[in-house]
Image (cartoon, grey):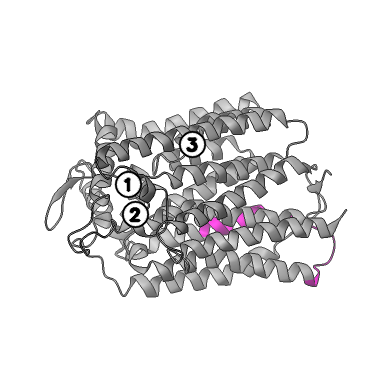
Amino acid sequence: MDRTREYRWFYIMVAFSTFEFLMLGFLQGYFGIYFSPLLFFVASMGVSVVALYASANMTEKGKSEQPKQKILFYTLVPLVIMLVWFAFSVFSKLPIDNNKSDVFAQVLSPSQWLLSGEYPYQQVVLPTYTMHNTYLPMQWIPFVLSLVFGFDPRWIPIVFWGAALLLFVWFSSTSSPSRISVHELILSSVTAILAVYSMYGFIVKNSFDFSVTLEMLPTAYYILFVLALLRGSWWGIGLTLGLCLMSRFSIILLIPFLVWYVWKRYGWNTLWKATVTGIAFILVVFVLPFMTKDPDLVSKIFSNYDNGAAGEWSTHSWQESGAEPYQLARGLGAAIFVKRMYEYDIRDGIHHLKQAGFALSFLTGIFLIYLYQRNRIFVNHDWVLLGGIKLYFTFFYTFVLIPYPYLYILPLTITVMIVVKAYNDIFDDNKVKLSR
């Protein structure tokens, strides 16, 4: 086996990943409001292209009976603990203020109503306005814990994210009968540092956004979903898909590819059991308790999102006259370009950006089905999944209506999982080897 070639592949992955982490962290907006989004897109695309290259150039081996080596996991544990503590030091200095953000009002209010036996989807009363709760159940139900036990609710997203990442690393550990080399120690340290740095850079650069967001919670669900897809557990796939769909609808346009993937890789039996499990979960946590009382609930959630987009596409009163809208000018996403094209009709621009995002995201799933089927004889199932999900989220979040920095925690975490998998595969003598 040509180890040099494998390492080169890993180094290219690390280079694109590091650049992507920097563009959401310390280099966010550094290259200007128009060039920065392009560079961020290139970095994200680079990760997905390298991962899909691996899917077409690496063949799979059977499961190994060799013991798992957990060096990456044990390297990562103290770093994740340090990250969680650092996150606490940031949000503890920024108390929850409903005058500055409505995020936690929208999760704590329904949590309190649920504990009181009231209907959770009521109008949320804020200091200067009221709004309908726009969050899906799995975005706010976990925050019942913070009310019951009386701790800061912002512990929940960061702890869930760290725990889910550690679970992913534990279960994706490599099989290796040989002693751990110095080279492997170095690369495991690099991988662990990159994984934690991805969130550290984001938190440092976006302290306020981090203190008012819960995005790490649905991201934790997606980590578990990808892990379930890699392991082929029908109940795991169904349950975690339900968690993902009941927190954000981001994955919904990739469903055709995911159905195809599970069917082709694990068979019809796994597919129908996972589907029934996911549907049952959605019925139990959303449809039966909430939608039966308000059939228009989903449309209300989407309409609030569109109305919010219109506000963020306009220059705020606290900005200088003539300045570009704050959220659109932070160096992320394509919204800034579309806004400039539709200065005369912002509503029309929002509509067309949404259409473009939906179309490209859906077509990405169709392309992945084609790629999987065309290369089915030699394709690496793990890598077509990881590279495909990364490619999908690259387009989905590039064309998001409001490019809030915290939204990119999800695609960034997919990159973290890709780097972890790349590290594991180059050292696993029993699972994956280069096919050519």
Q: Which residue is mark 1?
A: 339
Magenta range is: 163-182
- Magenta includes 368? no
- Magenta includes 177? yes
- The relative height of residue 326 versus residue 311 in the rendered view (above or below) is below
- The relative height of residue 277 versus residue 329 in the rendered view (above or below) is above
Q: Position of residue 178 (x, y in %)?
A: 85, 62
Q: Quadrant of the C terminus?
A: top right
Rendered image quadrant of residue 231: top right
Q: Alpha-carbon distance for marks 1 and 3?
A: 20 Å
- Going by the numbered disc 2, the residue's amino acid type is Leu
Q: Which residue is mark 3?
A: 361
- The relative height of residue 407 versus residue 281 in the rendered view (above or below) is below
Q: Position of residue 385 (x, y in %)?
A: 62, 41
The mark lying in front, picked from 1 and 2, is 1
Q: Which residue is mark 2?
A: 328
Other residues around mark 1 within 10 Å, as few (<14) / some (14–19) / many (≥20): many
Other residues around mark 3 within 10 Å, as few (<14) / some (14–19) / many (≥20): many
- Going by the numbered disc 3, the residue's amino acid type is Ser
Q: Nearer the viewer, residue 92 or 385?
A: 385
> Helix or strand or loop: what does disc 1 sit on?
helix
Q: Alpha-carbon distance for marks 2 and 3?
A: 21 Å
- Residue projecting furthest to the left: 128
Mark 1–mark 2 CB contact (< 8 Å): yes
